[in-house]
Image (cartoon, rainbow, N blue to C red):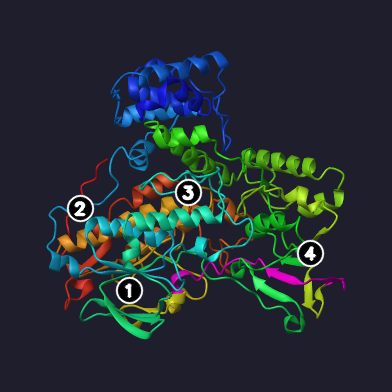
Amino acid sequence: MDQTAGNARLGDYLKDGDIRVLLMVLYHMTGDDRWLKPPYAPRRDVRLIPDPDAGLPPDIQDEIRAAIIQVFSQPDAQPAVPAPDDATLLKMMDATLGEQVSPEYAPLMQEEMGFVPRDVTWRTQPDAETLRRRHVLIVGAGVCGVALGVALGRLGIPYTVIDRNADIGGVWYMNRYPGCGVDTPNHSYSFSFGAAYPWSRYFVQRDELYDYITGIADEFGVRQHFRPRTELTGARWDEARHVWMATLRTPEGEETLETPYLVSAIGQLNDPSRPPFKGEEDFQGQILHSTAWSDDLDVAGKRVAIIGAGATTMQMAPSIADKVAALDIYQRTPQWVRPVKGYADPISDGAQWLLAHLPFYAKWFRFNMFWRYGDSLLPFLKIDPAWPHPERAVNKTNDRHRQELTDFIHAELAGRPDLIAKCTPDYPPYGKRILLDNGWYRMLTQPHVTLVTDAIDHFDADGVVTADGASRPADIIVASTGFRVTEMAAKLNITGRDGMALKSLWGEDNPSAYLGVSVPGFPNFFNMLGPNTGPGHGGSVIFQSECQSRYIASCIVQQTEAGATAAEVRQQAHDAHVQEVDDLHRGMIWSHQGMTTYYRNAAGRVVSVMPYRFVDYWRMTHDMDPAAYDFAVAGADLSASTNRPPMPMRRR
């Protein structure tokens, strides 16, 4: 830490610090167990953004701050506990949360907090020619493509990242509508590596996220491997030579690229869903999907209609309501909305300084955010078959959540029984993606805002006509109708072994993959944020991207060290995993009676989100299990090969 700050200056910064995090700093620096016990032990606080005083009285808070100043007033202060072992880390996690943490989280958080490295390493560094023959083509330059690029770059494995867009960023490049932002605390929605980013608030908006992701790409050299405005139009597996023949559409024309490995890093939210509307050709105004919003679209004084009332609209509508002449929102299904104290609050200069300079502070601040929007919710989303009120909830705690959220609706819409009726869902909370309040209900009460629940019949020249015959004029119609989630990598026109097309195998909406990553019949092909890997219970897709990038790197390293040129997941391993996923989902809220959600396909199977805790998925994807794959060298039959690498040595 910069010792020139001085005690008085440090004292000013500490006033903005989170006491529970400062206690962990004290323990690292002193190793004194008293900081983890009463009267200093923080009180349990389950809110997404907890009170920074940790439930402790002012005199105890002052004592903690004074102790921090005392520690860092010593010249060359060094930590007594620079890297805690698992037992110590678990004790610290228990203390900062005020609850007991399961032991299996310790090795996960060792990596997530950077006390031990997450990277895959070579047993023996391959020569340059061996590495050259391991080139990876990554399709998609969002968080997944960047995460994998970083992992491969550290191993010296050559790679190319392509994207149809003009720059890196994925959804944060594509989406530019007003209010666009993250609904996961951004200190959790960030990579475990790279320079600390000075987030302006707890839930930041699109421009900062785009700046952050492109900054990480620049910091780790991913941009050097990036080809913009380049689209994969098809890929075919060459069984004789063990390479993918990828056809690319580029600004210069079409070209073919041979690559041993192919990765779909397009995720699930990349293809806008834009249903056609009867009569839209008659409409005299402007129609656009939310992803097509551009900076030069001026809604000031205009009559705007938004079709859809999901996450995008909940961010967009309050952001434009004060500018437009009239705002009509067409809602098919109401959403449960969670209030978050401090949602839009800025992070103070003092807190920014602590995050950037106070040793261990950023690590523990990140841990707190990771935990609060992670696995703690999943147990409450399991169906209790003995629960007597399945028409309103899946278990007792879920019913309590329903009451809390219903109370919030009634408080926000007091005196508006018409809106209360329209805004109260008839399904259990978290059965669909939970949304965060952005002034949504208060906006709905404004006189120029109308929430329309009648079905849309057609468009006419002036605007939208609903099934009851009512006509509402509009100058601009925004289709906030989401994305085609279930198709995933099938849209990439990939043909695997024996001429099998991925689109034929998966159909329109039934994707499946071993660990959400590998597909039988498609050697050396990997999915990122593929089937059943979305974080439906909260948490960060960036965490998932790091788990999967390590797993893919592990696959390539083990294959290379075994001298194999191809690896294909066994059908038995795939089927067993998919069966487990389906069995678990039958007991989860997304399969509850009467539920409809984009997490499920037309047959009712959950294909988008995972039924696991993050710690479970981290363990499952930490190292490739070679027993789940067939390995071969070019010219040999994959199914007949016995050339397998040894089982990996696990650190835990």
Q: Which residue is mark 3?
A: 189
Amino acid at pointer 1:
Gly
In front: 219, or 81?
219
| Mark closer to the chain start, 1 or 3 | 3
Q: Which residue is mark 1?
A: 521
In the drawing, what numbered circle is on residue 301?
4
Q: What quarter of the picture does the N terminus occupy?
A: top left
- Say which quarter of the image contains residue 132: bottom left
Residue found 37% across the figure and 86% down from its top = 254
| Mark closer to the chain start, 1 or 4 | 4
| Mark closer to the chain start, 2 or 4 | 4
Magenta-highlighted residues: 467-490
Q: Which residue is mark 2?
A: 647
Mark 3 → mark 2, Cα distance in angstroms: 32 Å
| Mark closer to the chain start, 2 or 1 | 1
| Mark closer to the chain start, 3 or 2 | 3
